[in-house]
Amino acid sequence: MTNSKQTIWLLRGYYFFYFAMVGVYVVFMPKILTDLGYKPYEVGIIYASAPMMRFLVPFVFKYFIELTYKVFAASLILTLFSIWLFYITIDGFLGYLFSNIFFGVAMGISLPYIEAYALSILSKSDYGKTRLWGSVGFMAIVLVLGKILNSPNIGLFSLALTAFLTLLFGISATLNDSKKQNKTKEDSPGFSLLKYKYLWLSLLLMQIGFGGFYNFFTIYETTNGLSLELTSYLWSFGVVCEITMLYFQGPLLHNNLLSIIKFATLITAIRWLMLYLYPASIIMAFASQSLHAFSFALYHTAVISYIFHLYTQKRLAQQFYLGIAFGLGGSIGALSAGYFYGKYLFLIEAAITFIAFLSLFGHKEQNE
């Protein structure tokens, strides 16, 4: 594997600024929109558009386009362009919605390309130590902007700056891949989701099960008596556990990847069950957050590594993973969590995640 120190640091820079950009977009932009007078349902529609694009884009690449270096570079430029559109459309719902659709398309192209490239040149251990910089970037931008954000322009400038630096590091990190691709082409029409349907079903259900956590964890805990400050510490603790696992997970990934995915999925079901059974317990809340190391960090690395080896169409496979899991699964998860929110939310999430665990046994039988 080619893993020069320069390339590794460029990839770390890409992950740092890409997820810092995600942090601005997810954590702060909704608040900016409500301050500008957007209604909650309008914010919900806007924030459903980008994940839906992430789900739809892979189908375009399956039938019409190959995800090449030039397309990747174009997606980084499109990201910058869409943020420029944010500036001129943010005062109108429809214009801003279309800007977010462009943003969702660009984000659905950029990360899968980098994931496939990183896995092709790095060991599993080096991948985790590189990918953790995304978590660092996310946490850093949230801490910084939390102190200085006092106007929409600061939020939009932060988006534009992180997008530009993502472009700079992304282009620089993958220059060597542009030459290699002249010799290797992916046979996209031969890609099949149905061949491994139980695996894809599990990946979808796993992210649907995360809907309650991503969208209602803060509300759930504060409603059950925990302070907002303490809840923010819980979020930070989960990210620290995630970073720690990404750094030290290398030896674990030498084991059977499908078994790791099963273990992480089951652990996640137990995690949601803990939140249901002990909603007001600080100790159990921190214990639950500690499992983020397994249910996100270890799970994510095992899944993208497993899919990387399962399919010859490496980049397309990563697009479908992010599209089906985080795109479609994220959208359904948010909507269903909103519908089921209440005392039994995390019991329902635990049941959905346990079905995701059981689905993986269908995948094993299929491949025997």
Image (cartoon, rainbow, N blue to C red):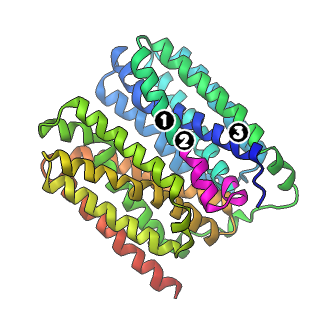
- Which element carries disc 1, helix, strand or loop? helix
Q: Is residue 326 within the magenta segment?
A: no
Q: Position of residue 90 (x, y in %)?
A: 48, 18
Q: Position of residue 18 (x, y in %)?
A: 58, 36
Amino acid type at image mark 1: Phe
Nearest-to-viewer mark from 2 and 3: 2
Q: Residue at x 36, y 38 (%)?
A: 236
- Disc 3 designates what residue? 170
What span is in magenta? Answer: 117-132
Main secondary structure of the magenta stretch: helix
Q: Are marks 2 and 1 in contact (CB under 8 Å)?
A: yes
Amino acid type at image mark 2: Gly
Query: Which residue occupies the foreground of this view, 47 or 20?
Result: 20
Q: Are marks 2 and 3 in contact (CB under 8 Å)?
A: no
- Disc 2 designates what residue? 134
Taking 202 as reference, is 221 left or right?
left
Amino acid type at image mark 3: Gly
Upstream in sequence: badge 2 or badge 3: 2
Q: Are marks 3 and 1 in contact (CB under 8 Å)?
A: no
Which disc is residue 138 wearing?
1
